[in-house]
Image (cartoon, helix red, strand yellow):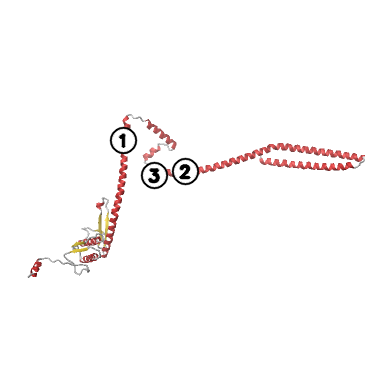
Amino acid sequence: SIDSHDKEKKKLLGLKNQSAKKIKAIKMAQTNKSRILAKLKLKSYTAEEEAELASERVKSVRKTARSAISCVKAFSVLADKHFASVPLHMEQEVAQENIMADRITLRHHKEEANVAALTVDKVQTLFELDRAKLKKAKEEAEASQKLTDESRSQFDKYPSKKEELEEVIIKLQSKINALAISDPNILEEYEQVTKAIDEVQATLLSNEEDYNNFETNLRKKEEAWLNPLQDVVKRVNEKFTSLFADLGFVGEVRLKPSGEGYHKYRLEIHVKFHDKDNLQILTSTVQSGGERSVSTIIYLIALQQLTPCPFRVIDEINQGMDPTNERLVFKKLVEEACIPGSPQCFLLTPKLLPSLHYSDEVTVVNIFNGPFMSLERELRFI
Protein backbone atom coordinates (compact mmCIF):
# COMPACT_ATOMS: atom_id res chain seq x y z
CA SER A 1 0.00 0.00 0.00
CA ILE A 2 0.98 3.69 -0.19
CA ASP A 3 1.56 3.94 3.59
CA SER A 4 3.97 0.96 3.57
CA HIS A 5 5.82 2.51 0.60
CA ASP A 6 6.20 5.78 2.52
CA LYS A 7 7.57 3.94 5.55
CA GLU A 8 10.09 2.03 3.42
CA LYS A 9 11.18 5.26 1.77
CA LYS A 10 11.76 6.95 5.13
CA LYS A 11 13.76 3.91 6.29
CA LEU A 12 16.04 4.06 3.19
CA LEU A 13 16.61 7.79 3.66
CA GLY A 14 17.64 7.15 7.28
CA LEU A 15 20.07 4.44 6.20
CA LYS A 16 21.50 6.74 3.54
CA ASN A 17 22.06 9.52 6.05
CA GLN A 18 23.77 7.13 8.43
CA SER A 19 26.14 5.89 5.67
CA ALA A 20 26.97 9.44 4.66
CA LYS A 21 27.80 10.35 8.27
CA LYS A 22 30.01 7.22 8.60
CA ILE A 23 31.95 8.02 5.40
CA LYS A 24 32.44 11.58 6.58
CA ALA A 25 33.83 10.33 9.89
CA ILE A 26 36.26 7.94 8.10
CA LYS A 27 37.50 10.75 5.86
CA MET A 28 38.08 13.01 8.88
CA ALA A 29 39.98 10.22 10.72
CA GLN A 30 42.10 9.56 7.60
CA THR A 31 42.91 13.24 7.33
CA ASN A 32 43.99 13.40 10.97
CA LYS A 33 46.15 10.32 10.60
CA SER A 34 47.74 11.70 7.45
CA ARG A 35 48.67 14.84 9.38
CA ILE A 36 50.13 12.79 12.22
CA LEU A 37 52.06 10.65 9.72
CA ALA A 38 53.52 13.77 8.08
CA LYS A 39 54.71 15.02 11.46
CA LEU A 40 56.17 11.67 12.26
CA LYS A 41 58.16 11.65 9.01
CA LEU A 42 59.95 14.83 10.04
CA LYS A 43 61.20 13.24 13.21
CA SER A 44 64.14 10.82 13.44
CA TYR A 45 63.38 7.43 14.89
CA THR A 46 65.34 4.47 16.04
CA ALA A 47 64.97 1.14 14.37
CA GLU A 48 62.68 -0.06 17.11
CA GLU A 49 60.50 3.02 16.86
CA GLU A 50 60.33 2.70 13.07
CA ALA A 51 59.38 -0.93 13.42
CA GLU A 52 56.67 0.00 15.91
CA LEU A 53 55.42 2.76 13.62
CA ALA A 54 55.34 0.40 10.69
CA SER A 55 53.30 -2.00 12.78
CA GLU A 56 50.93 0.77 13.73
CA ARG A 57 50.76 1.81 10.08
CA VAL A 58 49.82 -1.67 9.02
CA LYS A 59 47.15 -1.80 11.68
CA SER A 60 45.83 1.54 10.57
CA VAL A 61 45.79 0.48 6.94
CA ARG A 62 43.94 -2.67 7.85
CA LYS A 63 41.43 -0.73 9.93
CA THR A 64 40.93 1.74 7.07
CA ALA A 65 40.49 -1.16 4.68
CA ARG A 66 37.93 -2.74 6.94
CA SER A 67 36.09 0.58 7.21
CA ALA A 68 36.21 0.95 3.44
CA ILE A 69 34.92 -2.59 3.00
CA SER A 70 32.16 -1.83 5.53
CA CYS A 71 31.25 1.34 3.62
CA VAL A 72 31.26 -0.53 0.33
CA LYS A 73 28.97 -3.14 1.82
CA ALA A 74 26.72 -0.40 3.25
CA PHE A 75 26.60 1.28 -0.16
CA SER A 76 25.90 -2.05 -1.74
CA VAL A 77 23.03 -2.68 0.66
CA LEU A 78 21.78 0.89 0.13
CA ALA A 79 22.00 0.44 -3.64
CA ASP A 80 20.15 -2.84 -3.48
CA LYS A 81 17.41 -1.37 -1.32
CA HIS A 82 17.30 1.72 -3.51
CA PHE A 83 16.87 -0.34 -6.66
CA ALA A 84 14.36 -2.50 -4.78
CA SER A 85 12.37 0.63 -3.81
CA VAL A 86 12.26 1.95 -7.39
CA PRO A 87 9.24 -0.22 -8.31
CA LEU A 88 7.57 0.89 -5.10
CA HIS A 89 8.07 4.55 -6.01
CA MET A 90 6.79 3.87 -9.48
CA GLU A 91 3.77 2.10 -8.03
CA GLN A 92 3.24 5.06 -5.69
CA GLU A 93 3.35 7.54 -8.58
CA VAL A 94 0.98 5.34 -10.59
CA ALA A 95 -1.27 5.08 -7.55
CA GLN A 96 -1.25 8.87 -7.14
CA GLU A 97 -2.05 9.32 -10.83
CA ASN A 98 -4.87 6.80 -10.44
CA ILE A 99 -6.10 8.70 -7.41
CA MET A 100 -6.10 11.98 -9.38
CA ALA A 101 -7.90 10.27 -12.26
CA ASP A 102 -10.40 8.79 -9.81
CA ARG A 103 -10.96 12.23 -8.27
CA ILE A 104 -11.55 13.75 -11.70
CA THR A 105 -13.91 10.89 -12.56
CA LEU A 106 -15.66 11.34 -9.20
CA ARG A 107 -16.07 15.06 -9.86
CA HIS A 108 -17.55 14.31 -13.30
CA HIS A 109 -19.85 11.76 -11.73
CA LYS A 110 -20.96 14.32 -9.13
CA GLU A 111 -21.69 16.84 -11.87
CA GLU A 112 -23.62 14.21 -13.82
CA ALA A 113 -25.47 13.30 -10.62
CA ASN A 114 -26.41 16.97 -10.09
CA VAL A 115 -27.61 17.25 -13.68
CA ALA A 116 -29.52 14.01 -13.26
CA ALA A 117 -31.06 15.31 -10.03
CA LEU A 118 -32.17 18.52 -11.79
CA THR A 119 -33.57 16.44 -14.63
CA VAL A 120 -35.43 14.25 -12.15
CA ASP A 121 -36.90 17.35 -10.44
CA LYS A 122 -37.97 18.75 -13.80
CA VAL A 123 -39.48 15.44 -14.86
CA GLN A 124 -41.23 15.19 -11.47
CA THR A 125 -42.66 18.70 -11.92
CA LEU A 126 -43.86 17.89 -15.43
CA PHE A 127 -45.27 14.63 -14.13
CA GLU A 128 -47.23 16.44 -11.43
CA LEU A 129 -48.55 18.97 -13.95
CA ASP A 130 -49.56 16.22 -16.36
CA ARG A 131 -51.18 14.27 -13.56
CA ALA A 132 -53.14 17.39 -12.50
CA LYS A 133 -54.24 17.94 -16.13
CA LEU A 134 -55.20 14.29 -16.42
CA LYS A 135 -57.18 14.47 -13.20
CA LYS A 136 -58.98 17.62 -14.36
CA ALA A 137 -59.72 16.09 -17.76
CA LYS A 138 -61.01 12.94 -16.08
CA GLU A 139 -63.28 14.98 -13.79
CA GLU A 140 -64.60 16.99 -16.77
CA ALA A 141 -65.17 13.80 -18.75
CA GLU A 142 -66.98 12.14 -15.85
CA ALA A 143 -69.04 15.30 -15.28
CA SER A 144 -70.03 15.57 -18.96
CA GLN A 145 -70.74 11.86 -19.46
CA LYS A 146 -71.47 9.59 -16.54
CA LEU A 147 -70.19 6.05 -16.89
CA THR A 148 -72.88 3.41 -16.64
CA ASP A 149 -72.32 -0.19 -15.65
CA GLU A 150 -72.58 -1.21 -19.28
CA SER A 151 -69.97 1.32 -20.43
CA ARG A 152 -67.66 0.31 -17.58
CA SER A 153 -67.91 -3.31 -18.63
CA GLN A 154 -67.00 -2.28 -22.19
CA PHE A 155 -63.94 -0.40 -20.91
CA ASP A 156 -62.89 -3.39 -18.84
CA LYS A 157 -62.53 -5.46 -22.03
CA TYR A 158 -59.62 -3.31 -23.19
CA PRO A 159 -56.11 -3.16 -21.68
CA SER A 160 -55.13 -0.36 -19.32
CA LYS A 161 -51.58 0.23 -20.60
CA LYS A 162 -50.94 2.82 -23.28
CA GLU A 163 -48.81 0.59 -25.52
CA GLU A 164 -51.38 -2.21 -25.48
CA LEU A 165 -54.18 0.27 -26.22
CA GLU A 166 -52.24 1.64 -29.19
CA GLU A 167 -51.90 -1.90 -30.53
CA VAL A 168 -55.65 -2.43 -30.15
CA ILE A 169 -56.32 0.86 -31.96
CA ILE A 170 -54.02 -0.16 -34.81
CA LYS A 171 -55.80 -3.51 -35.14
CA LEU A 172 -59.24 -1.90 -35.15
CA GLN A 173 -58.09 0.69 -37.68
CA SER A 174 -56.79 -2.13 -39.87
CA LYS A 175 -60.16 -3.86 -39.67
CA ILE A 176 -61.91 -0.64 -40.63
CA ASN A 177 -59.58 -0.10 -43.58
CA ALA A 178 -60.13 -3.70 -44.65
CA LEU A 179 -63.89 -3.28 -44.94
CA ALA A 180 -64.92 -3.58 -48.56
CA ILE A 181 -67.63 -1.43 -50.13
CA SER A 182 -69.85 -3.57 -52.27
CA ASP A 183 -71.92 -0.70 -53.62
CA PRO A 184 -69.86 2.10 -55.24
CA ASN A 185 -72.74 4.57 -54.75
CA ILE A 186 -72.52 4.28 -50.98
CA LEU A 187 -69.37 6.42 -50.83
CA GLU A 188 -70.97 9.05 -53.05
CA GLU A 189 -74.11 9.07 -50.91
CA TYR A 190 -71.97 9.31 -47.80
CA GLU A 191 -70.14 12.32 -49.20
CA GLN A 192 -73.44 13.96 -50.14
CA VAL A 193 -74.85 13.36 -46.66
CA THR A 194 -71.63 14.68 -45.11
CA LYS A 195 -71.84 17.78 -47.30
CA ALA A 196 -75.48 18.27 -46.37
CA ILE A 197 -74.61 17.91 -42.67
CA ASP A 198 -71.85 20.52 -43.05
CA GLU A 199 -74.28 22.90 -44.75
CA VAL A 200 -76.86 22.38 -42.00
CA GLN A 201 -74.21 22.94 -39.35
CA ALA A 202 -73.09 26.14 -41.09
CA THR A 203 -76.69 27.32 -41.29
CA LEU A 204 -77.17 26.39 -37.63
CA LEU A 205 -74.09 28.38 -36.63
CA SER A 206 -75.33 31.35 -38.64
CA ASN A 207 -78.78 31.09 -37.05
CA GLU A 208 -77.22 30.81 -33.61
CA GLU A 209 -75.15 33.93 -34.29
CA ASP A 210 -78.26 35.77 -35.52
CA TYR A 211 -80.15 34.58 -32.46
CA ASN A 212 -77.39 35.75 -30.14
CA ASN A 213 -77.30 39.11 -31.90
CA PHE A 214 -81.07 39.32 -31.62
CA GLU A 215 -80.92 38.47 -27.92
CA THR A 216 -78.23 41.08 -27.39
CA ASN A 217 -80.19 43.77 -29.24
CA LEU A 218 -83.35 42.73 -27.43
CA ARG A 219 -81.66 43.06 -24.04
CA LYS A 220 -80.32 46.48 -25.02
CA LYS A 221 -83.77 47.63 -26.15
CA GLU A 222 -85.31 46.15 -23.03
CA GLU A 223 -82.84 48.04 -20.83
CA ALA A 224 -83.46 51.25 -22.79
CA TRP A 225 -87.22 50.83 -22.28
CA LEU A 226 -87.45 49.08 -18.91
CA ASN A 227 -84.97 51.15 -16.90
CA PRO A 228 -86.75 54.49 -17.53
CA LEU A 229 -90.09 52.77 -16.90
CA GLN A 230 -88.85 51.44 -13.56
CA ASP A 231 -87.64 54.91 -12.64
CA VAL A 232 -91.09 56.34 -13.43
CA VAL A 233 -92.85 53.62 -11.43
CA LYS A 234 -90.46 54.23 -8.54
CA ARG A 235 -91.31 57.96 -8.49
CA VAL A 236 -95.03 57.23 -8.72
CA ASN A 237 -94.74 54.67 -5.92
CA GLU A 238 -92.85 57.09 -3.67
CA LYS A 239 -95.49 59.78 -4.18
CA PHE A 240 -98.37 57.31 -3.81
CA THR A 241 -96.89 55.81 -0.63
CA SER A 242 -96.35 59.27 0.84
CA LEU A 243 -99.91 60.43 0.06
CA PHE A 244 -101.40 57.23 1.43
CA ALA A 245 -99.32 57.55 4.60
CA ASP A 246 -100.67 61.09 5.08
CA LEU A 247 -104.16 59.61 5.02
CA GLY A 248 -103.18 56.97 7.60
CA PHE A 249 -103.17 54.09 5.12
CA VAL A 250 -100.50 51.94 3.44
CA GLY A 251 -100.16 51.73 -0.32
CA GLU A 252 -97.68 50.79 -3.04
CA VAL A 253 -97.49 50.90 -6.84
CA ARG A 254 -95.61 47.96 -8.36
CA LEU A 255 -94.54 47.04 -11.88
CA LYS A 256 -95.55 43.44 -12.57
CA PRO A 257 -93.38 41.82 -15.30
CA SER A 258 -94.57 38.92 -17.40
CA GLY A 259 -92.70 36.18 -19.15
CA GLU A 260 -95.32 36.14 -21.95
CA GLY A 261 -94.16 39.43 -23.44
CA TYR A 262 -94.01 43.13 -22.80
CA HIS A 263 -97.67 43.59 -23.67
CA LYS A 264 -98.46 41.59 -20.52
CA TYR A 265 -96.61 44.00 -18.22
CA ARG A 266 -98.95 45.80 -15.86
CA LEU A 267 -99.08 48.14 -12.90
CA GLU A 268 -100.55 46.84 -9.66
CA ILE A 269 -101.81 49.04 -6.83
CA HIS A 270 -101.48 47.39 -3.42
CA VAL A 271 -103.39 48.97 -0.52
CA LYS A 272 -104.11 48.34 3.14
CA PHE A 273 -106.81 50.31 4.98
CA HIS A 274 -106.79 48.40 8.27
CA ASP A 275 -103.88 47.44 10.54
CA LYS A 276 -104.99 43.83 10.78
CA ASP A 277 -105.03 43.41 6.98
CA ASN A 278 -102.12 42.73 4.63
CA LEU A 279 -101.29 44.60 1.45
CA GLN A 280 -103.73 43.46 -1.26
CA ILE A 281 -104.13 44.24 -4.94
CA LEU A 282 -106.74 46.85 -5.67
CA THR A 283 -109.65 45.03 -7.35
CA SER A 284 -113.39 45.46 -7.76
CA THR A 285 -114.14 42.58 -5.39
CA VAL A 286 -111.78 42.92 -2.43
CA GLN A 287 -112.08 46.61 -1.50
CA SER A 288 -115.26 48.62 -1.02
CA GLY A 289 -116.37 51.33 -3.45
CA GLY A 290 -115.14 54.11 -1.16
CA GLU A 291 -111.71 52.43 -0.73
CA ARG A 292 -111.42 52.07 -4.48
CA SER A 293 -112.32 55.74 -4.96
CA VAL A 294 -109.71 56.84 -2.40
CA SER A 295 -107.05 54.68 -4.06
CA THR A 296 -107.96 55.97 -7.52
CA ILE A 297 -107.83 59.67 -6.67
CA ILE A 298 -104.55 59.26 -4.73
CA TYR A 299 -103.07 57.42 -7.72
CA LEU A 300 -104.19 60.22 -10.06
CA ILE A 301 -102.62 62.79 -7.76
CA ALA A 302 -99.36 60.78 -7.71
CA LEU A 303 -99.37 60.80 -11.55
CA GLN A 304 -99.83 64.56 -11.65
CA GLN A 305 -96.09 65.32 -11.34
CA LEU A 306 -95.22 63.01 -14.24
CA THR A 307 -97.91 63.86 -16.82
CA PRO A 308 -97.91 67.60 -17.61
CA CYS A 309 -101.19 68.87 -19.06
CA PRO A 310 -103.17 72.17 -19.01
CA PHE A 311 -106.01 70.88 -16.81
CA ARG A 312 -107.60 67.79 -15.33
CA VAL A 313 -111.28 66.86 -14.85
CA ILE A 314 -112.41 64.55 -12.04
CA ASP A 315 -116.05 63.50 -12.21
CA GLU A 316 -117.89 62.42 -9.05
CA ILE A 317 -114.84 60.81 -7.51
CA ASN A 318 -116.17 61.51 -4.04
CA GLN A 319 -119.29 59.43 -4.56
CA GLY A 320 -119.29 56.27 -2.46
CA MET A 321 -116.76 57.60 0.07
CA ASP A 322 -117.53 57.84 3.73
CA PRO A 323 -117.38 61.40 5.12
CA THR A 324 -114.01 60.88 6.82
CA ASN A 325 -112.24 59.64 3.69
CA GLU A 326 -113.98 62.25 1.55
CA ARG A 327 -112.67 65.08 3.75
CA LEU A 328 -109.13 63.62 3.77
CA VAL A 329 -109.10 63.10 0.02
CA PHE A 330 -110.58 66.54 -0.72
CA LYS A 331 -107.98 68.21 1.47
CA LYS A 332 -105.14 66.31 -0.21
CA LEU A 333 -106.58 67.11 -3.66
CA VAL A 334 -106.74 70.83 -2.82
CA GLU A 335 -103.16 70.84 -1.46
CA GLU A 336 -101.71 69.10 -4.50
CA ALA A 337 -103.74 71.14 -7.02
CA CYS A 338 -102.60 74.42 -5.43
CA ILE A 339 -98.87 73.63 -5.70
CA PRO A 340 -97.29 76.21 -8.07
CA GLY A 341 -96.83 74.76 -11.55
CA SER A 342 -99.61 72.19 -11.14
CA PRO A 343 -102.29 71.98 -13.86
CA GLN A 344 -105.79 73.34 -13.25
CA CYS A 345 -108.11 70.73 -11.76
CA PHE A 346 -111.91 70.55 -12.21
CA LEU A 347 -113.83 68.46 -9.70
CA LEU A 348 -117.38 67.71 -10.90
CA THR A 349 -119.70 66.46 -8.16
CA PRO A 350 -123.45 66.69 -7.41
CA LYS A 351 -122.75 67.33 -3.72
CA LEU A 352 -120.07 68.32 -1.29
CA LEU A 353 -119.76 67.94 2.45
CA PRO A 354 -120.02 71.09 4.54
CA SER A 355 -116.93 72.75 6.09
CA LEU A 356 -114.40 71.23 3.71
CA HIS A 357 -110.83 72.47 3.46
CA TYR A 358 -110.50 75.28 0.89
CA SER A 359 -107.73 77.66 -0.08
CA ASP A 360 -107.66 81.02 -1.83
CA GLU A 361 -106.87 79.32 -5.14
CA VAL A 362 -110.13 77.28 -5.05
CA THR A 363 -113.15 78.55 -6.98
CA VAL A 364 -116.59 77.02 -6.36
CA VAL A 365 -119.12 77.19 -9.18
CA ASN A 366 -122.73 76.17 -8.42
CA ILE A 367 -124.89 75.33 -11.42
CA PHE A 368 -128.67 75.64 -10.93
CA ASN A 369 -131.17 74.05 -13.27
CA GLY A 370 -134.93 73.22 -13.14
CA PRO A 371 -138.46 74.52 -13.95
CA PHE A 372 -138.20 77.38 -11.51
CA MET A 373 -135.28 78.81 -13.51
CA SER A 374 -137.70 79.67 -16.42
CA LEU A 375 -140.11 81.41 -14.02
CA GLU A 376 -137.25 83.48 -12.65
CA ARG A 377 -136.28 84.68 -16.15
CA GLU A 378 -139.89 85.66 -16.92
CA LEU A 379 -140.22 87.61 -13.71
CA ARG A 380 -136.92 89.38 -14.44
CA PHE A 381 -138.38 90.97 -17.63
CA ILE A 382 -141.74 92.10 -16.13
Could you tell me which quadrant the N terminus lies in? top right
User: Where is mark 1, residue-wise?
Assistant: 193
Q: Position of residue 68 (x, y in %)?
A: 80, 38
The residue carrying pointer 1 sits among few (fewer than 14), some (14 to 19) or many (20 or more) residues within 10 Å by Cα, namely few
**Left or right: 315 with respect to 91?**
left
First-in-chain label (2 vs 3):
2
**Left or right: 56 with respect to 239?**
right
What is the three-letter code of the residue carrying label 1? Val
User: Where is mark 2, residue-wise?
Assistant: 126
Q: Nearer the viewer, mark 1 or mark 3?
A: 1
First-in-chain label (1 vs 3):
3
Q: Position of residue 14 (x, y in %)?
A: 73, 42
What is the three-letter code of the residue carrying label 3? Glu
Could you tell me which quadrant the C terminus lies in? bottom left
User: Where is mark 3, residue-wise?
Assistant: 140
Task: Assign a secondary structure to mark 3.
Answer: helix
Q: Residue at x 57, y 41 (%)?
A: 108
Q: Residue at x 48, y 44 (%)?
A: 125
